[in-house]
Amino acid sequence: MKLAAVSESHLPPHEVAEQSCDAAVRALLECRQIDGHWVFELEADATIPSEYVLLRHFRGEPVDAALEQKVAVYLRRIQGAHGGWPLFHQGEFDMSASVKAYFALKMIGDDPNAAHMRRAREAILARGGAVNCNVFTRALLSLYGILRWRSVPEMPVEIMLLPRWFPFHLSKISYWGRTVLVPLLVLQALRPRAKNPRGVAIDELFVEPPQSVGPASKAPHQRWIWFVFFRGIDIALRPAVRLFPKSLRRRAIKRAVAFVTERLNGEDGLGAIFPAMANSTMMFDVLGNKTNAEIARGSVEKLLVVGNEEAYCQPCVSPVWDTSLACHALLEAGGSQARDGAFRGLDWLLPRQVLDVRGDWIARRPQVRPGGWAFQYANPHYPDLDDTAVVVMAMDRARRAGAGDRFDRAIDRAVEWVKGMQSGNGGWAAFDVDNTFDYLNNIPFADHGALIDPPTEDVTARCVSMLAQLGETLDGSKALSRGVKYLFATQTNHGSWYGRWGLNYIYGTWSVLCALNACGIDHNSVEMSRAVDWLISIQNPDGGWGEDGTSYTLDYCGHEPAASTPSQTAWALLGLMACGKVGHPAVERGVRFLLQTQNKNASWDEERFTATGFPRVFYLRYHGYRKFFPLWALARYRNLKAGNMSSVAWGM
């Protein structure tokens, strides 16, 4: 069922967009929290809800049968037609997600002979069995005693004592790697056994005796020469760790505990991400620290989404990201109600700027003052550049729309931090500086291929957009000039840009085109023209745009069509309009797609995942994307058409 306004196809699209935007603004404002901010559900695959169930049983917590049954309903619903569980909606079978989902369902009490369990088991066995799961899954199964620890790469806790110049050091890996790995090092050293009161096992998922399983094979992204080298180190370490002095181990564990305790982050959790929270809970349990164990465990509970029929656990929450993007959409939509809603959201963001905590990023930039925003409600050790740039651009736009000077100091401090966080190659990463130690993705532990946080095109584009929107120029700003050079150097042969944190090349290309436009790059330049041609060439017959997780394949050869989604269509439209193409037929077709797919609630439906946690291994579905990105694109189209303009004045 569609809104009556959008079905009147005899009206010019920009006039229909006016009515569509008004309804979408009202719908977005209705989603606000009572204090003026937005936070939408953030959904991943079956892995996180499964691990939540298994964490409860690892600790031997009282069974919450009603909650577990709701999780089971959710897991059964998202099971794929192939019998297993995918990493994104309608995706291919994934071994680790499937093993964990099967284990969780069996733990909840599903009959292994039930049709859905039998299908899952057959799918797993047909693909070689659970031996082919990833390192993190192997660690979980080792904690349950299903596998032996020799199936997991040797990661001695003494790593905590290595000097910074050593080839492997915590400062050389990503923030998510640090927060997940440090408590896991303690668990691997002490090797607690899950309480598992029901005694559930999953031996039936292996084609060989689970206790005979050895080290994992090379991951597809890993290079043989590096893998063999690190595998040799792993082999040598296994007997060597038994010879390490006990005093050294105690000192290493103490340092690991100090690291986690400093960053425990109260009810928001270590790193404010589920895997780190779960690992820290188990670590404090085995150490007998009940107080911190309960703090860590409480942070996990805040990630639950519990409905009438289903429940699942989120990987984290996204209030700063959701609020800042919602404010952008409202400011684009205009009108007093939308503007007031945006101002109130930005007022909520203002005190959440991190000004007093010198986080892990100081390892590379000790002279820089803090000044960023984190993604979650609180994560002061780990603010990120993407959120910070988006917040600053919204605040800058708000002050030009009548918000006064109340955001000025926050903007200035954030700009100082962002400039200080530029990497040596001119780009910006999400959380760190010069975190480019790619060889570390070849260690056996890094089979996920996401152990580091290097500069990326999308985050760099956001920082460039911010600086340009604030008035910096290529001639007058070294930081801006270096950022643009990085973007020019990373354009693909197809004309697109890679999207690290959104799916994928559509997201990256939108981000970069907005940045280049903000810098005043000629719309007819080779770089922008090639990107425009690419976007137009991949438009779907229905007028929308779509792309899925398969675009992260290591042997990517070009765009593969995927079903159109509202958020990806909005990105493509915003990218094309940033290049002055508001009058192009492709833009009108895209606008009509959004108008025709707006639902009776004045929002859009979007089951497909359009965001990325880690390419090839972890994807995200932001439930807010379908609410604010289409509104943003339609409002911009309406504004440009109504003003008879072709140029966009903002960084996003």
Image: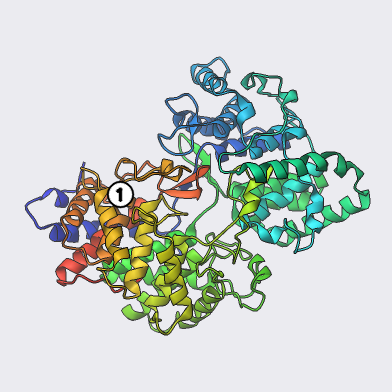
Residue 16 position by quadrant: bottom left
Q: Residue furthest front?
A: 225
Task: Decide: is 395 above or below 504.
Answer: below
The residue positioned farthest toward the top in the image shown: 113
Q: Is residue 545 above or below residue 201?
A: below
Number of on-image labels: 1
* x then y, percent, for residue 375: 52, 60
In the rendering, at what x and y percent does residue 553 appear? 46, 42
Q: Please indicate, yes or no, whether residue 194 appears anywhere in the rendered image.
A: no
* Quarter of the rendering occupied by the C terminus: bottom left
Name the residue at 64% across, 52% down.
439
User: How far from the left and from the top, in percent, is residue 504?
Assistant: 40, 50
Quarter residue 24 falls in: bottom left
Q: Residue furthest left?
A: 10
Residue situated in front as seen by the camera: 361 or 319: 361
198 or 175, nearer to the observer:
175
Is residue 578 among what the camera can see? Answer: yes
Kindly identify the amino acid type of the residue bearing the numbered disc 1: Pro
Q: Residue placed at 29% from the left, 59% from the top?
A: 530
Q: Which residue is mark 1?
A: 566
* Identity of the residue drawn at 38% across and 82% down: 471
**Residue 234 in the image, given as x and y percentages of width and height:** 76, 42
